[in-house]
Image: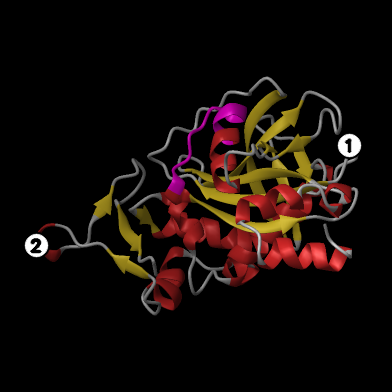
Amino acid sequence: MFNSKAEERRYYEEEASEAAYLAWYQTQEVQSYARPSLTIDNIIFSFDRERERLQILLIQRMKNPERGKYAFPGGFVNPNEDAKQAAIRETKEEVGILVADTNIWQVGLFSKPKRDPRTWVVSVAHVTYLPPSDPKKVQAGDDAKSAEWLDIVREGATLYLVDASGTKIGLDALAFDHQEMFMTSYNRIKQYLEIEPDIVQVLGEEFTINEVLAIFKIFDDRFDKMDNSNFKKTFIQRHKIFQIISGVDFKPKLRSTGVGRPKLLIRYLKKY
């Protein structure tokens, strides 16, 4: 029918119907291309208001590979869903938390060769900021030994995680390339801290200066020696990304913490 492969290709690409082209395409060299498996991972931040600790949600792997190591909730993308839908589904299946479609965003694509010892696997990493209104009780799925909230701690230039027993866990102990995923998210948050500090969404609609300062200190040592008063003067009042909330008769809105005087409440003004 065709005098050459070039003539055949030109016909199907330029003259045939799309249905005929697609059927022909499946018979061509596309079948010889190696295809990676597509997965997602979800880096979920939260805030323990009682202890004023920024936290991250991890599972402890029950099965090989990387058995026993901590990892972010994740799994394989199904053919009938996009990466975000898979991230929402896998988070629900792995840790029992349903994240809102509006509360999850992609932080990067991770595709280094041999990042997964099983096969060629590419992962789309997501970040979720879990607000206080969302349930934080977690339950490990079938593939996880446990699901836990761990504190994020910074000492000087060193970051590590702390579990409920007080055990320190280095980021290099995370499974696969999840240390790189965490640091990519961490550095992105740090880069935009004074422009668009969306990490404070873990605090909800209203929060205290002390709470937001506790988060800022995790990302930038410039805030280490600041107290609430200095932070309010040098940052809260001089930047347009925060707003002091007014109550009845335009008085500042306060929250009783049960200790000392009630705390001034502020709000994050999103850019979007």
Give coordinates of residue 34: x percent, y percent. Answer: 87, 49
Circles 2 and 1 in contact, beta carbons < 8 Å: no
Could one spot residue 54 in this view of the protein?
A: no
Amino acid tagged 1: Arg
Foreground residue among 239 and 58: 58
Q: CA distance from mark 2 to mark 1?
A: 63 Å
Q: Residue furthest front?
A: 1
Q: Earlier in the sequence, mark 2 or mark 1?
A: 1
Residue 249: which numbered mark, if any? 2
Where is mark 1, residue-wise? 118
| Numbered-mark total | 2
Give coordinates of residue 187: x percent, y percent. Answer: 67, 65
Say which quarter of the image contains residue 100: top left
Give coordinates of residue 38: x percent, y percent. Answer: 73, 45
- Asked if the stretch drawn in magenta spans residue 7, the answer is no
Magenta segment, which residues? 91-101
| Circle 2 residues within 10 Å: few <14, some 14–19, many ≥20 | few
Q: Is residue 7 left or right of residue 192?
A: right
Give the residue drawn at x 67%, y 44%: 40
